[in-house]
Amino acid sequence: MTRDEMYMRKALELAALAAEEDEVPVGAVVVKKSTGEIVGRGFNRREYGRSPLTHAEIVAIEEASRRLGGWRLIDCELYVTLEPCPMCAGAVINSRVERVIFGAYDQKAGSCGTVVDLFALPYNHKPECTGGVMEEECAAVLTEFFRGLRKRKAKADG
């Protein structure tokens, strides 16, 4: 198992927690590169918090910032099960995360190359990005969640 796969598995564990709470199953971890320590964890909390801002990445970045004592996440990587949206890609840029590793590509809102590549724009920080790590496993979690959601909705309607 590679280093990227090891931390993506941690993000997948968090995605499973989100699914248990009927949240879109996206999980994220922030890892301090030099030590390998997970300094931030997050999963989607939009329904629970009734907030469009509580994406997995934002929750993990916020926890890492508090834990490390500052907003600059130098020497940090973000592992997330789904390609970041524009808001989360912006948070990555603003927090100075050095590298983003994501699993499934997001055809509707992916902002690390699929719909747009915010990291390629002339901002003051350009994170490295690796997509498709454990892509099938990450995509399957989302597919299964939305399949179940559609079945529950059909049952309630019918």
Image: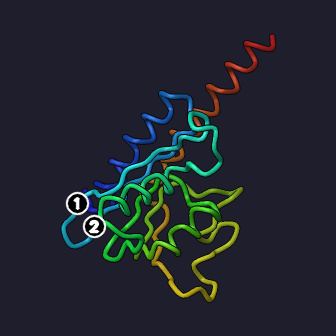
Give the answer, above or below, for where 129 lies relative to 48.
below
Q: Position of residue 73 (x, y in %)?
A: 37, 72
Identity of the residue drawn at 57% across and 78% down: 119
Q: Amino acid at mark 1?
A: Glu
- Nearest the viewer among 82 and 68 is 68
Q: Is residue 158 left or right of residue 8?
A: right
Q: Is residue 107 left or right of residue 123?
A: right
Give the answer, above or below, for where 71 lies relative to 149.
below
Identity of the residue drawn at 47% across and 52% down: 59
Identity of the residue drawn at 70% across and 67% down: 115
Question: The N terminus is located in which quarter?
Answer: bottom left
Q: Label 1 crowding class (10 Å Cα cut-off): few <14, some 14-19, many 20+?
A: few
Q: Label 2 crowding class (10 Å Cα cut-off): few <14, some 14-19, many 20+?
A: many
Q: Position of residue 100 (x, y in %)?
A: 45, 68
Q: Indicate which disc residue 37 carries.
A: 1
Give the answer, above or below, for where 2 lies relative to 97.
above
The Cα–Cα distance between marks 1 and 2, rounded to whole angstroms, is 5 Å
Q: Indicate which disc residue 32 carries.
A: 2
